[in-house]
Amino acid sequence: MKYIKKNELYELKDFLILWSTQSISQLGSSMTGFALTLWLYEKTGSALSTAVLTICSYAPYVLMSIFAGALTDRFDKKNTMLGCDVFAAVCTIIVFILFRTNSLMVWHLYVLNAVSGLMNTVQQPASEVAMTLIMPKKYYQKTSGLRSLSGSLISILNPLIATALYSFIGLNGVIAVDISTFMVAFTVLLFFVKIPENKSDKRERVLVLAKEGLLFLRENPLIMALILFMSGVNLVASAFDAVLPGYVLPNPKGGSSVLGIVTSCSGIAMIVGSLVVSVLPKPKNRVKIIYFTMLFSLGTENFLLAFSREPLLWCIGQIIGWILVPIMNANLDVVLRTTIPVELQGRVYACRNTLQFFTIPIGLFIGGFMVDNVCEPFMKVYGDLSVLKALFGSGKGSGAALMMLILGVSGSLICIITGKKLKKYQYNEQ
């Protein structure tokens, strides 16, 4: 059986064109972000400094998402996506110019990441609605699997290609590739993709539309419970992202190349998960799958990394932690798309973004702060104790290992406590 049949290929033509080119552009952007993380860690040696880089991207995303979704429901989806792409590309070009002239400073990256994050805040709900408009409902699970697949490939290729380019031709080369991929995606979206107009889009005031999104969530407790559950998951996952560079880079068996390989393993796992979910039959209970997959992921990976000293085990931990994520994403995606009316999706997805992702900058800050100011100093003072040395090793990076243990315990507790609420709700797929 082919992954996509010929008749499906025709029906999904616009989706496949948009998905593939946007994925290429996302790969370029991710490579730049990874290379900037390496550059920043070389300059500062601080896990918190690299975490702040991501925080600056997510802060506007969290603060402005509700209003961005309302804007999305007022304006043409294609033009919104094109405009946001242009602004984000300009930010990348500015970084390129500053670096070429030896003028790039840490605060420049923070400011430009914040602007780029603001553009993504507006683009993301527009993109979500656009995807709904150009694909038939019967393909929701399959297309969700494809989107997870592209995200997985990006997770694999991004650190590997970024590390290679950064090592051989520097930050200049990485940014040049990013700009090239943007031009491809922008041209294809402008000339070759037709996004149907949503006839039910409203022209009311932004505040009124934003309120409607919040009211929908209040009247649909299952969706709200899923969002709050995922916000807890995101808190731990984002803290892990902040801790990982401080765990791998200073380790005697680590370094930038090893960080690239370890990071890529999450993408390999997600590819496997994406392929699995694309052929799985419709499950009996999507909500239970969302809960149990996240409990397994957060309850295994952090513990394995906390107590291991070998890159191979770090890779295995990444695979275990990420292989079920596409299955969770696909089921969550189907629940949202089949429950939220398409005319409300822009503003509801935007409200979802604020409530589900507001914990990401908090987690990034907590992860970086705990490593730099609590765990590493603690291990520096008490790390010679035999039990601590046996559990977490010694030297720089041992504090990050201690933080991994804290995240493992926290993630398991969050899933167990908040997941109980999900059991009260029934989801009936139409």
Image (cartoon, rainbow, N blue to C red):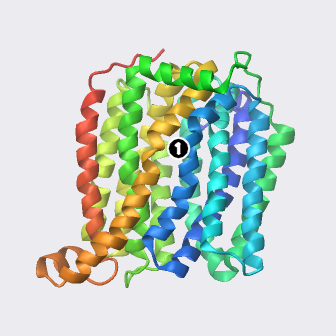
Q: Which residue is mark 1?
A: 62
- Camera-nearest residue between 364 and 205: 205
Name the residue nearer the viewer: 260 or 116. 116
Residue kind at label 1, given as amino acid type: Val
Q: Quadrant of the N terminus?
A: top right
23 on left or right of 41: right
Q: Find residue 315 and report its horizontal and vertical position in percent.
A: 39, 66
Residue drawn at x 34%, y 81% is: 396
Res 319 quadrant in image? bottom left
Q: Position of residue 88 (x, y in %)?
A: 72, 53
The image quarter in which residue 154 lies: bottom right
Residue sitting at x 61%, y 59%:
30
Say few, some or many: other residues with alpha carbon within 10 Å of mark 1 (under 14 / 14 to 19 / 20 or more).
many
Residue at image x 73%, y 81%?
A: 102
Q: Is residue 134 above or below residue 329?
A: above
The reply, left or right, for residue 388 in relation to residue 164 is: left
